[in-house]
Amino acid sequence: MAEHDYTAHVRWTGNRGQGTAAYKGYDRTWSVETPGKPPIHCSNDPLLGGDPGLHNPEDMLIAALSACHMLWFLHLASNAGVAVHAYDDTPLAVGETDAQGASRFLRATLRPRIAVPDGTDLALLDALHARVHETCFIARSVNFPVDVPARYRIARS
């Protein structure tokens, strides 16, 4: 096994001048800054007072899960000799909040739409999706079930 380090600088940007002296007196905005990359401006979930126009941690987790799955799927498809022409996903995560305010994800559904050449073995592609969860860093790290009902279309040459 080899360990890998990942880092980011998460900076709270919501101090209106009095810090957190009053619960409604500060913004839930923050940024992710990684050296050499553009910053990502974020906020809290709008249900918790965040800015709906900015990414929140929940958005970023489901996006990371979807992107990791996509990248591994493309890798496995390429290794299997399948030419994927297009891939897009509209993932959905379902969460819950208990009476004390603690929240968690219950499940996620990745809904990739994939374009492949005529004659592609779609059962093979479904098997590749199942294999992704053996290797995808993010999928192997979450503690909720992830379903992947992929849809395929034949790409025009």
Image: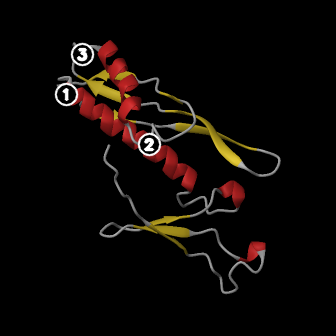
Q: Quadrant of the C terminus?
A: top left
Image position of 6 (left or right of 20): left
Do residues under tags 1 and 2 come within 8 Å of each other at their CB atoms?
A: no
Count neighbours of disc 1 (C-alpha within 10 A) and say few if under 14, some if 14 to 19, many if 20 or more.
few
- Type of amino acid at the residue the image marks with label 1: Asn
Q: Which of labels 1 and 3 is toward the front?
A: 1
Q: Position of residue 40 (x, y in %)?
A: 44, 64
Count neighbours of disc 2 (C-alpha within 10 A) and say few if under 14, some if 14 to 19, many if 20 or more.
some
Read off the residue under disc 1. Answer: 79
In the structure shown, which secondary structural element does the residue marked by tag 1 occupy?
Answer: helix
Q: Return the residue nearer the eye: 88 or 98.
A: 98
- Type of amino acid at the residue the image marks with label 3: Thr
Q: Residue at x 42, y 36 (%)?
A: 89
Read off the residue under disc 3. Answer: 120
Read off the residue under disc 2. Answer: 138
Q: CA distance from mark 1 to mark 2?
A: 21 Å
